Image: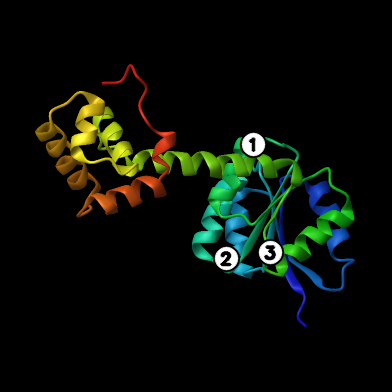
Amino acid sequence: MAPVRLLIADDHAVVRAGLRALLEQQPDFAVVAEAESGIEAVRQAVAHQPDIVVMDIRMPGGLSGIEACEQIMDQLPQTKVIILTSYAEDELVMDAVRAGSVGYVLKRVGSSDLVDAIRTVSHGDALIDPTMTKALLEEVRQAAKVKEASAFSELTPQEMRILALMVEGLTNREIAAQLFLGEGTVRNYVGNILSKLQVSNRAEAAVFAVKNHIERHLPGDDDH
């Protein structure tokens, strides 16, 4: 089996030398290039097309490790990037994941852990440092909440209340009585709701509302 071809990108020569010495001890690894800046990392990646790039997140020369990762992924989608950094900053993790990196490892990990991380990524798995997993999951949860809320962005607070009552199975007359509105007014609201949600009937509107967790996004009493 051919060895995993690696590119080491770090602005410190001593770090690069240490990483090369460590990784070349592994019979299944081959370091094919090094880079000391983000721009050089992209250039070397294109020239050598490594399987994995081990990239410092803070690179000099006007192109950060995250930006270099992004460019490498654009040009070499088969190449995988592991971000190696001293900084356990939540936002950096998110930026690295958004840029397309499949691994995020803190520099303080032991040598064997780094080797294991590279092997994990080479086998097609993603790897995020355990200390960062919670932050990443929270970002995913928040993104899901934003997506849910946007599903109802066209509806007014009153339309949201009426839609919630439609989910409960109330008729126009029952909704009118509960909200102190005329039945004709409720009928108009329902028509507007169906149009805005781009559904054809009350049942489809109810399914849409349940799927997007309308109960989490209902307006307060002060919203009109």
N-term-proximal mark, 2 vs 3? 2
Which circle, 2 or 3, is nearer the viewer?
3
Query: Can residue 110 be seen at all in this image of the molecule?
Result: yes
Q: Position of residue 29 (x, y in %)?
A: 80, 70
Residue linked to disc 3: 125
N-term-proximal mark, 1 vs 2? 2
Which circle, 1 or 2, is nearer the viewer?
1
- Which one is in front, 20 or 150? 150
User: Three-letter amino acid code at disc 3?
Assistant: Asp
- Which one is in front, 101 or 67? 101
Residue 46's label in the rendered image is 2
- Which one is in front, 62 or 147? 147
Residue linked to disc 1: 90
Q: How far is the residue under mark 3 from the one under mark 1?
A: 21 Å
Q: Position of residue 163 (x, y in %)?
A: 28, 39
Q: Position of residue 170 (x, y in %)?
A: 27, 40
Q: How far is the residue under mark 2 from the one under mark 3?
A: 23 Å
- The kind of secondary structure element at disc 3 is loop
